[in-house]
Amino acid sequence: MKQFILAAGAILWRKNEDKYTEVALIHRPKYDDWSFPKGKAEVGESLIACAFREVFEETGIESEFGAFLGQVEYQTVDGLKQVSYWSAKALSNKAFTPNSEVDEIKWIALTKVREFLTLETDKKILDKFMKIKFDTKPFILLRHAKAITRDEWQGDDDDRPLDALGQNQSKRLLSIYQVFNLQQIHTSDAVRCYDTVDPIAKGLGIKLEVTGKLSESSYKKDKEKAIDYAKELIKDDQRILLCSHNPILPKLLNKLTKKSDLEADDEKLFPGDSWVIHRIGKDVVQIDRLDSPIS
């Protein structure tokens, strides 16, 4: 019986000494083709985490992920394969060591990449990559993981903790958000928010910035506090994650992106979901949505 195969990869790029963009292509001896690094997702693995892992496993190069590029589908002997792609900036320049899947890497000038690609589906993803501004920094709006319901909790709402599902979600968020090479993480002081991002901060070695201005209780009293906090934060030319609550995050998204013509996919986030605002300076160039690793 044929399967539906989920896979993910990235267009890995860098600037050369002359500041021109180059893209890494891999040669797979099994297929004798030139393509972008990619591979099958493991059971329960999010697609962006899969792409990040595959880039490192196949190239040995550490990377920093940017905008989502889309998906392609094609038939294989095992079934229909769907591959999701992101842009990824190379962070290291170590010498390549051949492995069981890849025996050679070439860095090709962006204008010449199409000539080397074997698969037509790779050419479609390249076309999308060439149309976007890919040297971006993320500003991530993350909703806390699933919490115990208000009906189940007798104490202060700010102290309401994650439930069993939410605890599992929080443990798996690091594999998703490490791909962005984050520099700052800010969170509401509500327990459910703090416990959502604390594993990410610890895993990345980043100091967790905790503030009441992003809490739901504060927002009910003064909506401008959270908005002003986020507006000041986005002025920093850094890679930032902000964790807060559902009533607040759609408002922040609207305020932070209103000067662009872009719209997010949905009006609200489910627990553990996020919007990733990709920006260059003050300009918002793309908004992606990342789903919770478990729902």
Image (cartoon, rainbow, N blue to C red):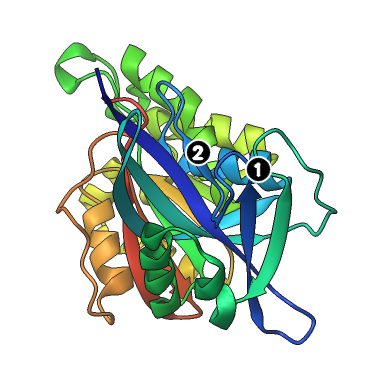
Question: Residue sitting at 24 percent across and 73 percent down?
Answer: 262
The residue lying toward the viewer, choosing from 161 and 222, is 161
Inter-mark Cα distance, 2 to 1: 9 Å
Residue 163 visible to the viewer? no
Residue 10 percent across, percent down from the top left: 51, 54
Residue 231 numbered mark, or none: none
Amino acid type, residue under disc 2 in the picture: Gly
Query: Would residue 244 appear left or right of 97 to someone viewing this image?
Result: left
Q: Identify the element where label 1 is drawn.
A: helix
Amino acid type, residue under disc 1 in the picture: Glu
Question: Residue sitting at 49 percent across and 77 percent down?
Answer: 280
The residue lying toward the viewer, choosing from 108 and 31, is 31
Residue 28 percent across, percent down from the top left: 61, 45
Query: Would residue 284 appear left or right of 89 to someone viewing this image?
Result: left
In which image quadrant can residue 131 be found?
Answer: bottom left
Residue 39 numbered mark, or none: 2
Residue 15 percent across, percent down from the top left: 69, 76
Query: Would residue 25 appear left or right of 259 to someone viewing this image?
Result: right
Report if the CB atoms under discs 2 and 1 are less than 8 Å apart: yes
| Quadrant showing the N terminus | top left
The residue lying toward the viewer, choosing from 81 and 295, is 81
Residue 131 visible to the viewer? yes
Q: Identify the element where label 2 is drawn.
A: strand
Residue 188 percent across, percent down from the top left: 42, 43
Label 1: which residue? 58
Position of residue 209 relative to residue 114, above or below, is above
